[in-house]
Image: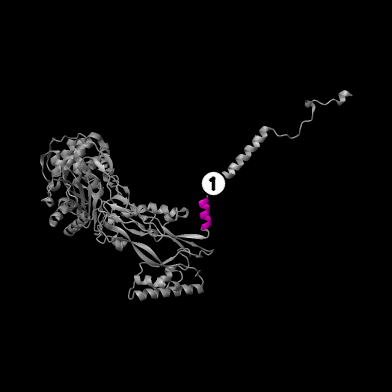
Amino acid sequence: MFNRLRKKPMAEEDTPVNKPSTARLNLFFFAAFVIFSILIFRLAFVQFVEGPELTYMETSRNTKDIPLAPVRGPIYDATGEVALAYSEPVQSLYVLLYEDYRNDERRQEAEELAHDLAAVFKQFNPGDKEQPDAEEIIKRLDLDYQKTFGYVPRLVKSDLSTKEIAFFMEKKADYPGVMVLEENIRKYDPDGVAVQVVGYTREFKRAPDSIAKYKAIREGASTQRDPGLVYHEEEKVGFDGLELQYQEELRGRSGYQSIDIDARNLPDGTMLQTPPEKGYSLVSTINKEIQMAAQKAITDELRRLPKAITGYAVAMEVDTGNVVAMASMPDYDPNDWDYDKIKYVFRNGTTESFPPNDAKPSRAESVILLGSVIKPLSVLIGLKEGLFTAGQTYHDQGYAVLGKDGRQVKNSHSAYNGSITARRAIEKSSNAFMIDMVGKRLLSKYGSEGIDIWDKHMKEFGLGVSTGVDLPNEFLGRLEYNNDDESALTRLAFASFGQQAKYTTMQLAQYTTMLANKGKRMEPHLVKEIRDADGNVVKEIKPKILNEVDFADAHWNEVHKGMVTKVSSFDGFPYDYARKTGTSEQGTGPNKKENGVFIAFAPRDNPKLAVAVVVPEGGFGSVSASPIARKIFDAYDEVYGLDGTPKGKKDEGKDNE
């Protein structure tokens, strides 16, 4: 009995049911923590990362941003005071369509408005046939929405007169939807300063896909969320020259008009306007005074020469690479842009013109064979490669013999020079020396690989490669010595005296600069500063050496001493200077053309300026090209001073005493 009533020990008592363990509790709380962390992270991601995009998507359903063209920054000459390109404000008339005018009743209202506007324009501009009539205004209103959406204001007329502006501002209530907005038109120096360098602007809608930056903007338009970077189809953008090269810096940021729209894509509410931001300004290296002297010099020579119709000149500072003048003549008026008028003359000295066409004398090639101006480099290569020594003599009988058939290649005028050294060969412009002592000996030393050796040296001097100039569409040259249709002997022989490759005037100027500074290939610059709208310098373009060549100083001196060809146009020039004339030949028979080429740098012992001039079909370079170079040197001396003292300022000081 006692045993039955005895209390059970603990081990024998009933165990509680579903009592959770500590591990299971910890797992539960950890899972809850992870879930809440994910939810919090997702909420933060939506708010801070996706929030702007979602907000844009939500507001864009009811609000549209209509871009306003930015105020394009100016381009100044080297003084920073003369504007070569600038934006001038004008007032334009726009019409905002508040109704759908595709039905007959509404369309009649729009047509009545067009007639009213045409009458106003006629009232304030009697006899002006350029004013839009009612039919033209209806076309510009785009009532069928073929060009754009209903909420986009339609441009009716640009550059309103003062009287027109006053009229529409006063009668604003009588013309609902009519707006007078300020825009900017691009203007250029009326003197036509370096127009092919500065370039020109056209409407964005006209930009071809060949301009990569505009193609990319079009392709990314649908995903562009920054209204300031949205391009309007009518916005003016750079198409060539500095206007294209520095498009992003010059452009600034678009303004925009924000307007609520309804389901019909028509305005439904008040329009809010955010003004555009002005672009940066460029201070170019082009000095207007020197540039105008170069342009006039080319124009004067073209009038005098019987066959030449174009001329090119580049003046480049030896130490900085700054291009103080770059003239291509004839030029055009960028304020009155007409492609049919300018299509043969809009290129500059870094690009390739249309190829020559004997049936159209208005067309001449801008990229030509260099002729004898290559001979200083030929001699340098010969000395560098050990093909001859500076004191070694060569008997120049007036010609060199090529091949087993005994073909003769003569000097100019078959000149007999007798016993000459390399230095004398440059001075006398001996084709025979270059062929026998450079071309043939490169072939003898390297075989057909001599072509590669020649090519390497050319490119080290910037011939056949990019100069690095800050201009678009640079042409790299046409290297005819790489043509396998001719023998290696023929190619090296003719290349040695400048008859196997065509280069731009800019490449020729960079090469001349390298001769002057003994082997430093300076990057040519056409812009030296970029400034913000307040005039603060945001970027300074400093001199840059692209590469250097290693030639013995004695070899440089030998070449410099050989650059002493007699040039009558430099009679009375107050400085010792180094120069080389050239006359390259293209074509044969009645289509034979002689191109004038000239290079020089001054002063000889402390070079400040290098000049290259090309006159296609100008005849001898000493006659056609050298007078242009002389006037450029004189202008530079007046403005900056070839010895560091500006002669123009000095004379002005005397006049003021």
Q: Is residue 54 magenta?
A: yes
Vertical position of residue 517 compared to residue 220: above or below: above
Q: Position of residue 362 (x, y in %)?
A: 25, 59
Residue 471, position as x, y percentages in the image? 31, 51
Q: Magenta-highlighted stretch: main secondary structure?
A: helix
Is residue 354 something one can see in this rendering? no
- Please rate how many residues cluster around mark 1, counting C-alpha atoms within 10 Å: few if below 14, some from 14 to 19, many from 20: few
* Residue 614, magenta (yes or no): no
Using residue 469 as the reference point, say whether residue 274 is left or right of it: right
Q: How is the image coloured?
A: one colour
Q: Is residue 653 left or right of residue 8?
A: left
Instruction: Give the camera-side residue of 529 and 153.
Output: 529
Q: Quadrant of the N terminus?
A: top right
Q: Residue furthest right?
A: 1
> Which residue bears the numbered disc 1?
45
> Residue type at mark 1?
Phe
Query: Whole-percent x and y of residue 426?
Result: 15, 42
* Residue plotted at (44% across, 65% down): 153
Q: The residue tagged with tag 1: helix, strand or loop?
A: helix
Q: Nearer the viewer, residue 371 or 241?
A: 241
Highlighted magenta segment, given as a residue range: 51-59
Kindly tell me whether residue 413 is visible in this rendering.
Answer: yes
Question: Splitting the image into 4 quarters, where does residue 87 fall?
Answer: bottom left
The image position of residue 246, as x and y in percent, is: 34, 52
Q: Nearer the viewer, residue 171 or 491?
A: 171
The quadrant holding residue 452 is top left
How many dots with numbers?
Answer: 1
Q: In the picture, which quadrant includes the C terminus? A: bottom left
Residue 606 against residue 21 in the figure, above or below: below
Q: Is residue 156 above or below residue 415?
A: below
